[in-house]
Image: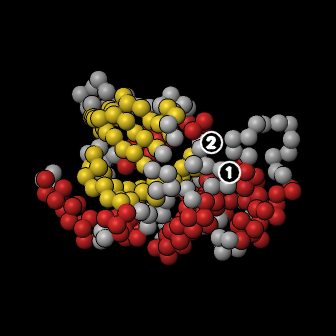
Amino acid sequence: MLELRHIEKYYNAGTVNEMCLFDDFNLTIQDHQFVSVVGSNGSGKTSMLNLICGSIPLDGGRILMNGRDITGLPEYKRQRSIGRVYQNPAMGTCPNMTILENMSLADNKGKPFHLLPGTNRQRIDSYRESLKKLGLGLEDKLEVKAGVLSGGQRQAMALLMATMTPIEFLILDEHTAALDPKTAETIMILTDQVVKEKNLTTIMVTHNLRYAVEYGDRLLMMHQGHAVIDQAGQEKASVNIDDILKKFNEISIECGN
């Protein structure tokens, strides 16, 4: 279970441009929930992910992971329990390393460093089998550098690498936004398969309302640091795109847009 308790976050604190994004924000995500998060730019979606991952500091409140307070835990230590896939496909892989080297790097996440070869040749068959499941032909390109792959291929690899080691939480930060529609559909199907196969607690930020409706078992809409929609289970299953658009329009009118 992931808990955000009484979260406070300010940007440009102490200046004329000070902006309070979160003020006493609370959120609890149960084990194995797949939460889709939508909202306009500046609503707090990505900031929430960054706070959970430790990429930016809190100004108040606590974050608990399975009852353990991780508020002061540095980002690299949180990554042992958290896998993250970014919007930019280039951020999930190392372009100058081969597919095999990238897979080996991900396979060693959280393990101690020793004066041993970085690539475990005994694991090649396992890597090849994992890549084969993606259906992109990458299992036959182990010696190809990741930088020459398409955006979709790199994002599929990033998803696989983020979930190779045992993790408790998967963070998806608009991970289909930079892809063409067909490739985005492929990545979403792969995402759903991985989440269900590994039974992961997942938070997916997306601007694609259809994906938010179709995937996951809980829907959050963020606005100015608050969850203005929070529906799970049967409530979430009954939501359609028009319902979300209606709420977006209401917010736009309130904000004078």
Q: Is residue 118 left or right of residue 238?
A: right
| Vertical position of residue 254 compared to residue 114: above or below | below
Dot 1 surroundings within 10 Å: few (below 14), some, or many (20 or more)? some
- Residue 116 visible, this orientation: yes
Q: Residue at x 82, y 51 (%)?
A: 119
Q: Which residue is mark 1?
A: 165
**Mark 2 or mark 1: which comes first in sequence?**
2
Task: Give the image location of residue 20, x and y in percent.
Answer: 27, 35
Residue contact between numbered discs 2 and 1, judged by CB atoms under 8 Å: yes
Look at 49% across and 51% down and name the residue there. Answer: 31
Residue 256 vs residue 246, the one in the foreground? 246
Q: Circle 2 — which element?
A: loop
At label 1, the amino acid type is Thr
Q: Position of residue 103 (x, y in %)?
A: 72, 55
In the picture of the structure, the residue carrying the numbered disc 2 is 80
- From the viewer's side, name the closer residue of 228 and 235: 235
